[in-house]
Amino acid sequence: MTDPTTVSAPPRVAYIGCWYKNDMYSHNCSNLVDSLRAGGLKIDVVTSNCRCFSSAQRFDVSTDELINGNCAAMKIPHAPQNPGKSHGLLKYLIVKGFRLDIWLALARGVYYYRNSRQADVIHYDQVLEAFGSIPLFVLAMLAGLTHKRLMVTIHEIEPFQRAHRWMNRMYGKCEEVLVYSEDMKRAVVALGVAAEKIRVIRYGLVMPTLTQVRRTRYLYFGGHFILKDKGYPEFLGALKLLKTRGIAVQLLIYVGHGCNGLEEARAMADRAGVNDMIQWGEFFSGAELAAAYQASKACIVPYTGGSARHPLSSAMANGTPVIATRAADIPEYLGPLGIYIDGSAESIAKAICEIEDGTTDVAGLSRQMRNAAMAELDVVKIAADLSPIYSSKAS
């Protein structure tokens, strides 16, 4: 019989990540944290105000802006890399001239360490700016000096760390570097990080219950930058082609909270004469997200770059076929189940027509995609795979 006094306690983890409820990164972070906690890990979440928060100009964190209150929220000024002049010329000159974005990012890294130093393992969710490369650089230096175990999950690579490649030595101080695709792994290797240092995992989510709802429309996710790498002009071109051919389809476009380029995107749809085909919505999560996907015949992802993990994983979990290019992460997640296009308006329109006329077996694809999601994207399984990593190198 095992002596209970010889069984080591699970490590205490500090998870630093976005907790803003209207952001897709926060939902990925919180789903993983919840699953890790359910598996027995003690996890303290450390978050911060950032540009996404509506309270950012007050340098504050409002409770109703958080995905939940089970976290420690830091309050520190935020300065954008490229400030506008809407808040006054003096503030613009101070931020721009003194590069306050860098100084405040360095300070944020110190505060992240201060708020997580009691943990056995620090796990940093790298996105952008407030959760970007500069705070991670500071965190890595301080963790190295104090022999603190550090892990990082890379969602995004910032232009700043591409321009200052020496910064990427910080990944060498991390015990684990996690990414969500082989495509991202190649990008991180290009920064000078050893390939064997990087572990590829899947972008998980809670598996929603499937309902017997009639699928009547199509779905498009515009993200936070709808006009950047999303194939939006070609998407509108496809709608225009369909309309001229007398094929009536309805679209739901949803975007990230505070989406950049949204007004121009709406104007483009109006100029193309397809606004009557489109319903616009803001960021969905939970049951609302599941309902949006399960009411759709297909999700359209004509992306040319960036990450498509959110719409891909959401579509797969809800059994929604995907019309997509082969850019970025897309083929890794969809495999042979994608309805692949070359990204042109004609190819998008053709794929939609083949769904409408029954050429594409969407019912069969729906079942296969749901099965693939259950096997690969269930966050409970992903957490179970990650849990041993936190303890494996504990002293």
Image (cartoon, rainbow, N blue to C red):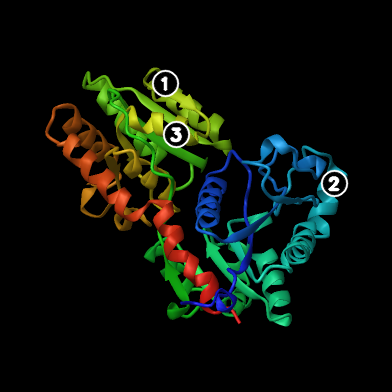
The residue positioned 53% from the left and 30% from the top of the image is 282
| Image quarter in which the C terminus is found | bottom right
Of badges 3 and 1, nearer the viewer stands: 3
The quadrant holding residue 56 is: top right
On the question of residue 341 being in view, the answer is: no
Circle 3: residue type: Leu
Where residue 318 appears, as percent x and y from the top left, is 33, 38
Q: What element carries label 2?
A: helix
Residue located beneath label 1 in the image: 275
Whether 199 is drawn above or below 169: the answer is above
Residue 33 falls left or right of residue 365: right
Dot placed on the residue nearer the N-terminal end, 3 or 1: 1
Dot placed on the residue nearer the N-terminal end, 2 or 3: 2
Q: Which mark is residue 116?
A: none
Circle 2: residue type: Lys
Q: Distance between the residues labelled 2 and 3?
A: 39 Å
Where residue 84 appears, as percent x and y from the top left, is 73, 43
The residue positioned 72% from the left and 64% from the top of the image is 116
The quadrant holding residue 8 is: bottom right
Of badges 2 and 3, nearer the viewer stands: 3
Whether 28 is drawn above or below 291: the answer is below
Given residues 221 and 91, the one toward you in this image is 221
Task: Sort mark 1 into few (<14), some (14-19) or many (20+) by Cα contacts within 10 Å.
Answer: some
Residue located beneath label 3 in the image: 289
Q: How far apart are marks 3 and 1 (CA)?
A: 22 Å
Where residue 326 appears, as percent x and y from the top left, is 30, 53
The residue positioned 78% from the left and 59% from the top of the image is 104
Residue located beneath label 2 in the image: 91
The residue positioned 29% from the left and 39% from the top of the image is 319
Circle 1: residue type: Asn
Dot placed on the residue nearer the N-terminal end, 2 or 1: 2
